[in-house]
Amino acid sequence: MTAPLDIRFIDMDIEAIAAMEGRVAVLLPPDGKMDKLARRANRLTRGTIERLSQSPRWEKLEEGKLVEIAMPGGMEADALLVVKLDRRATPALARKAGATLAGAMGTGALHVLAASFAKAGDVSYGLALRAYTFDAHKKKDDEAPAGKATFMVAKPEALAAETADMAAVVEGVFFTRDLINEPSNVLGTEDFAARLAAMGELGLEVEILEEDELEKLGMRTLLAVGMASDMPSKVVVMRWNGGGDEAPLALVGKGVTFDTGGISLKPAGGMEDMTMDMGGAGTVAGVMRAIALRGAKANVVGLVGLVENMPGGNAQRPGDVVKSMKGDTVEVINTDAEGRLVLADVLWYAQDRFAPSAIIDLATLTGAIIIALGHEHAGVFSNDDDFASRLLKAARDEGEGAWQLPMGPAYDKKLKSRVADMKNVGGRDGGSITAAQFLQRFVKDGTPWIHLDIAGTASTKSATDFAPAGATGWGVRTLDRLIRDEYEVAGDADEG
């Protein structure tokens, strides 16, 4: 996987600043008051930082942004980066400042003179999240220096300990981004499952259910989606048992490694983007990686349904009726509404086998959610408003956009079928809501459940605050925060 940026924390040494190569960054509050390290850089550059802090340019500069001074006199550095950031900045603003540094660091070394800045850990977190490039299929320049960053701080060991969990989450985010960015001829169902199986090395229990087992279990709605593909359909189960005897939180992800729409074929324009239709499964995998790396004291089970939706002589057809693991029958009106068929069986299996305390599914499910919310927010649907509010708080705390939409019996009427228990689509109006209503039918009474429609947030055409264009890793930070805040047990629970 893409390796996160090498970030190290070192002791303060004012004599070393003059000889630092690459780029040197100073964190300067809006009032221009300098700490010990900033004063040293200011003296070396004959008052450059002080003059900047008293200029109209500094006054107009947005907090969290920076001014670059090229080839600063008195220093070996190629550039001096002066970041406008209050010492009382929120974690969110400090992370955005770190992301700004990532955009300005170029290749080679970055040295951040953070001294005793209280949010230095958050600055490093934002830097690490934004310093991502997916170049697995590009020629490599062997002579290009590897990027690295050092933070010169008052208490490096304490800061390294503080950011250890952040580093685990960054790796989970990068794992998700890599999965979503991979082309489908590389990341088919077999390779996807193999990458998840390799996480057994982290202490996860990983189990792969093959097609014959899925048939015995009655997962016919899932299997129907992949009938015409040469890629075998699979369900992968990942278990992290860090919370004693507590019932697990279940995470369920849609993993359509490529979606042509099947017989209800998508238009050619933009179909290449359907390599990201496994974004829900990718996010579940990233969360499981993050909690394993940081040794979360919680019980979490992640389940992903891996299929490929292709046309062919043996593909499911509009008008087919298939029977779910639950026993309900579904009239397939549109074979391009396949994600809900995958999730239906995996949702039921997750509850039937693990009896989870709560369940969250994630899917790039509907284009309608993009029309409703754009690329700023994921759609949140739930049968439990308190559960939804806790997830929304976690999303706010992590700066990931999420918005709850309504559900209700009136939308169920649109799913009525003449020949089966339900249809798989309910029309264009309220399309994201009727998709959620469909999924709710596969959630047992009394089980708190959230459906996250991430079609607009899993991958974007332009850069976001913490990711370049392409896969964002949306949801890994939110779900890790939810697990940390709501599901981790106190004490020394067994891990692994």
Image (cartoon, rainbow, N blue to C red):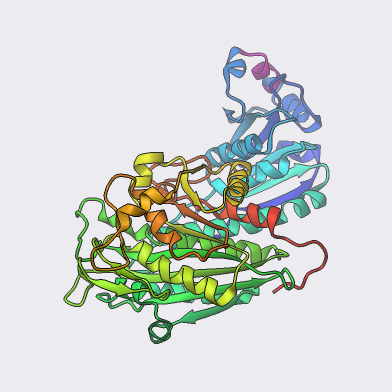
Residue 115 falls in image quadrant: top right
Residue at 83 percent across and 64 percent down: it is 491
Residue 211 placed where, x, y %?
38, 83
Instruction: Using the image, determine if residue 459 lies above or below residue 15.
Output: below
Could you tell me which residue is drawn at 40 percent across and 71 percent down? 306
Q: Main secondary structure of the magenta part?
A: helix
The C terminus lies in quadrant:
bottom right
In this view, 71 is above or below 420: above
Residue 416, how many percent across, how many down? 30, 59
Give the image location of residue 111, x and y in percent.
67, 42
Task: Decide if residue 246 is on the left or right side of residue 374.
Answer: right
Identity of the residue drawn at 67% across and 53% down: 166
Locate residue 67, reporting x and y percent.
Answer: 58, 27
Q: Nearer the viewer, residue 189 or 450?
A: 450
The stretch drawn in magenta includes residue 84: no
Residue in front for this viewpoint, 398 or 165: 398
State which quadrant residue 66 falls in. top right
